[in-house]
Amino acid sequence: MAMTKIAVNEAKKIADGKRLKPGRVVGTKGVQFTKGNNKRLQVIGWDEFERSLSDRKLAIYESKGWMKIMRK
C-alpha cells in the first residue's frame, strides 16, 4: 500500500467523513486521530494538532482513506 503525504486540510476532510478528531496522548507529546471516547487521548484543536506535527517534524500520510502520522 503506497502512502502519500497529505496536507492537514485534506486530513480534516477525511477525518470529518470518519468522525475523527485530532488528539494528544495524555501525558506525552504524541498526537493521533481519535473518535473522542478514549480516556488516554485528549481531543485538541486542529491548530494545536498542526503545530505539534510541525514541531515534531511529522506529517500525515494517506492511502485509500487510511491515515497515518509519520516522520517526514
Image (tube, grey):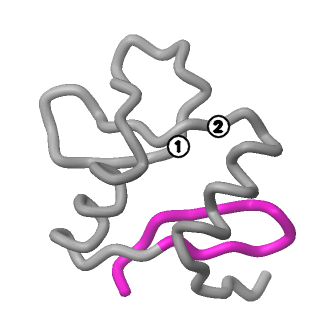
- The disc labelled 1 sits on which kind of residue? Phe
* Mark 2 residue crowding within 10 angstroms, few (<14) / some (14–19) / many (20+): some
Does the stretch in magenta take in 62? Answer: yes
Say which residue label 2 marks. 20
Q: Is residue 26 above or below residue 67?
A: above
Image: magenta residue range: 60-72
> Where is residue 29 drawn, in percent x and y?
17, 47
From the top left corner, tell me how far across and down residue 25 is, in percent.
Answer: 29, 34
Q: Pointer 1 and pointer 2: residues touching (CB < 8 Å)?
A: yes
Residue density around tag 1, few if under 14, some if 14–19, many if 20 or more, within 10 Å: many
Instruction: Quadrant for residue 56, please give it.
Output: bottom left
The dominant secondary structure in magenta is strand
**Relative to 48, is 35 on the left or the right?**
right
Q: Is 41 placed left or right of 12 in the picture?
A: left
> Which residue bears the numbered disc 1?
33
Residue depicted at 35% across the width and 79% down the height: 71
Q: Residue at x 42, y 72 (%)?
A: 70
| The quadrant where residue 44 appears | top left
Mark 1 residue element: strand
Residue 36 drawn above or below residue 18:
above
Q: Earlier in the sequence, mark 1 or mark 2?
A: 2
Q: In which quadrant is the N terminus drawn? A: bottom right
Give the number of callouts.
2
User: In the image, is residue 54 part of the stretch drawn in magenta?
Assistant: no
Does dot 2 land on a helix, a strand or a loop? loop
